[in-house]
Image (tube, rainbow, N blue to C red):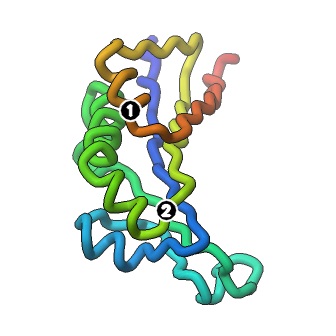
Amino acid sequence: MNTPSDQFMIPCHLIGKNFSPRVASEKTGIRFYTQTEVGEMERIGKLIATHGHASFEPPLEFQQMENPYVGLFWMVDTLTEHIDTLRSCGADHIYIDLGVIYYGDLKLGFDPDFLMKLANLKIEFWISGYEEKGENS
């Protein structure tokens, strides 16, 4: 029986009282899949936003590779390149929210160079696991 491979969801979230996703996108070329400027109407709750916030993920071609870590490496490399610019645009809370849909057991391993690169960003790194039950579970 073939077990489906694990899947990674790798959004990065940026928030700040003075954060402008529009300016951040213009300066970095990052395309946000959600974004709200300070003072805009929130999509959920219909309140005026007191903080700017945005989220982005690796491009689809990096998410659909056989090695699920490729998208995570892309995210950390992109943040390494643009973290100072994102902060200068007002993002004062930045975090990667790694979600893993797994089948059977879950074991994640990270190489020391990757961990150092991640640590140098000085951002939070969240990991959530979601067990996918098979038909015969």
Q: Residue at x 38, y 79 (%)?
A: 22
Judged from the image, the secondary structure of the residue bearing numbered disc 2 is loop
Q: Reply above or below: 83 against 25.
A: above
**Quadrant for the N terminus in the image:** top left
Question: Alpha-carbon distance for marks 2 and 1?
Answer: 17 Å
Provide residue 11's location: percent of width, then percent of height.
Answer: 47, 49
What residue is disc 1 on?
A: 120
Query: Could you say which disc has been placed on residue 129 in the image?
Result: none
Quarter of the image with the C terminus in it: top right
Instruction: Work out whether residue 118 or residue 43 is closer to the camera in this orientation and state it.
Output: 118
* Kind of residue indicated by mark 1: Asn
Q: Which residue was labeled with disc 2?
A: 91
Q: Is residue 64 visible?
A: no
Q: Secondary structure at mark 1?
A: helix
Amino acid carrying mark 2 in the image:
Ala
The answer to which of marks 2 and 1 sits earlier in the sequence is 2
Residue name at image x 51 percent, y 37 percent: 98
Q: Quadrant of residue 74?
A: top left
Disc 2 crowd, CA 10 A, few/some/many (<14, 14-19, 20+): many
Residue 16 seen in render: yes
Above or below residue 97? Residue 20 is: below
Residue 52 at x, y percent in the picture = 56, 73
Q: Is residue 24 left or right of residue 65?
A: right
Above or below, comparing residue 108 to residue 100 in the picture: above
